[in-house]
Image: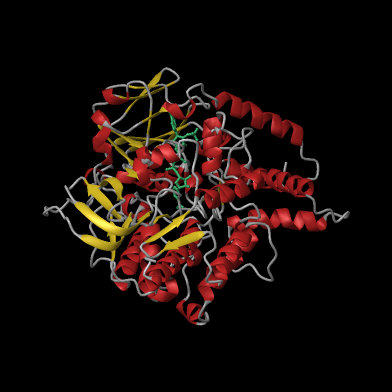
Amino acid sequence: MTATEPNIDREAMHARYAAERDKRLRADGNEQYLDIVGHFAHYLDDPYVEAPAREPLSDEVLFAFVGGGFAGLLTGAKLKQAGIDDVRIIEKAGDFGGTWYWNRYPGAQCDTAAFIYLPLLEETGHMPTEKYTKAPEILDHCRRIGTHFALYDNAVLSTEVTEIEWDEAAERWIIRTNRGDEMRAKYVGIGTGPLHRPKLPGIPGISDFAGHSFHTSRWDYDYTGGSPNGELMDRLGDKRVGIIGTGATSVQCVPHLSRACGELFVFQRTPSSIDIRNNHAIDPEWFATLEPGWQEKWLMNFTILQTGGFADEDLVMDGWTDISQRIRDRVLANPDQEFTPEAFLRAYHESDDEKMLEIRARVDEIVRDETTAAALKPWYRQLCKRPCFHDEYLQAYNSPTTHLVDTDGKGVERITENGVVVAGEEYELDCIIYASGFEVGTPFERRSGFDMVGQGGLRLSEKWADGMRSLHGIHVNGFPNAFVVGPTQAANLISNVPHNLTEAGETIAMIIARAEELGARRVEVSEAVETAWVERLEAGGRTFGGDPSCTPGYYNNEGGEIADSSRRSSLGFPEGPVAYFAYIDAWRDSGEFEGVDFICDS
Ligand code: NDP
């Protein structure tokens, strides 16, 4: 059957989707993963930088930001642009970069086009070298932002925040860290990222393994040889290596492992969908023709097209915009010109059926061994899991030393002293690499490593016990002068997270500039304003993921029931990202900052 064949047996296809999902449902749902503490704590150690010795700090800054990834860098940069200089980023890693600091596994690269994924390109004057740049270039760009906006000057690195507490009398936040610091700040920002804390699979016997092991977000190049730049991992030539997991991370590093390992065993529970990547170098001459303001234009063009809107041209042209344009074209081709939600849903389903047929056909075109090819085919809708794009992953399975060990949806059975057991067969290994992802849906304070204590001793964990509550995903009643930076309860644009962060940084910078101009002591939102915002989002019901008909994964709480609290925490603006960006732009530009109270001395 080909993608264009009109007689797709949709019923059979969807029955297979349901059967494959059911096979994977587990009673323990999200509880199947291990919290990386105690015996496992070393999996979180920073392999890249040793924390330098220093004396504890007990000083005060105007704005302290927790997290030196894109959220902190963008907010810091926007604050500097707004004339706020006294900014301190506190980061547990040894440098800026966030996810790009930690994830240095071979083959790591951005999955969203660099022209829109890398923030502040015009401000820093950087031209991405490729459409999808590799991780070292992204990490360098993070450092470039840090240098360009002088964010290193006051930064505190290799330092983990343990608690943030509001001092009502002094109207200051007190920030305590694992280095004995007790800093004070008038304002705090929190940008610890949605996929911050690695997780391990709760496989029986996991602590019995006597060989070497690490998580992909803490790649051990001392053991493997090679480097994040893609040089051959020359210490693996005589090694039998197993990698557990076949998500977006594994898809990017398997081709490199395949080239390097004596034998590579890829343990698969659910195959990813692997669409075409089509990466290419950027032509500097062409880049020089871009006019000032191009990045903002590209960002909006992508967001419009990716969320089903109309634009004269597709500037980014990638797998993300392809998905939504297919849907849109189907709706337009509908002879009845029906533009109802039902028509869009039908168009989505039909486009997706077509796309997934193509993706499965691609597996057959590339993978020579029929059994392996069959096991690599994804049987679910493309957006049930993170879509992957790669032009070397499927090809890796044609190597005689690369073995797919498909667990038929059951997962690895057991780990022993010697290796990994699947379906009763033990695979002896020298090294196990956990490509098992990151915590999603666990409590905020567990993922971030600290709690916030707001007015009246109220903890953020208590405040959000029934899910996130905020205005614009930024302000939380009871937590004055505090600002949260993330996609949720705002645009919720998942296909290009930095776009959300850019806007949040801009909003915060404008608010702080106004507060300082007014001589305000506090910036806060009332409970009524916060409730109205949450109710507005709840009425719209636009959340990220959560489709129970999908194959289990972190998008849908492993197929388990989605609690109201989780749903609330993943709400987005009812009319979608484009409308949100227009809304927040107008909200800021009005100069009224409606809903935000600036408390000044009377
Ligand atoms: P994921 O959570 O997507 O993948 C974890 C993998 O581990 C899955 O394949 C999962 O199988 C598997 N697994 C878990 N438990 C077991 C078990 N007991 N036995 C066998 N397999 C098991 O993590 P990733 O790190 O791959 O990706 C996380 C997210 O990070 C992505 O979704 C994406 O948002 C982001 N990312 C972005 C990239 C980019 O933009 N360039 C690159 C890489 C990641 P199953 O699917 O059955 O649960």
Residue at the extreme top = 424
Residue at the extreme front = 602
Residue 411: percent from left, percent from top: 46, 26
In this view, 12 is above or below 108: above
**Which of 220 and 585 lies nearest the eye of the viewer?**
585
In this view, 17 is above or below 173: above
**Which of 347 and 402 lies nearest the eye of the viewer?**
347
Residue 481: percent from left, percent from top: 38, 57
Ligand 1 position by quadrant? top left
Residue 505: percent from left, percent from top: 43, 63
Residue 95 visible to the viewer: no
- The quadrant in which residue 357 appears is top right
In this view, 320 is above or below 446: below
Residue 284 visible to the viewer: yes
Q: Residue at x 73, y 41 (%)?
A: 1
Q: How is the image coloured?
A: secondary structure
Residue at the extreme right = 336
Q: Residue at x 77, y 40 (%)?
A: 8
**Which of 240 and 293 lies nearest the eye of the viewer?**
293
Q: How many marks?
A: 0
Residue 82: percent from left, percent from top: 39, 73
Q: Residue at x 88, y 54 (%)?
A: 336
Q: Residue at x 78, y 45 (%)?
A: 342
In this view, 365 is above or below 481: above
Q: Quadrant of the C terminus?
A: bottom left
Q: Is residue 173 left or right of residue 386?
A: left
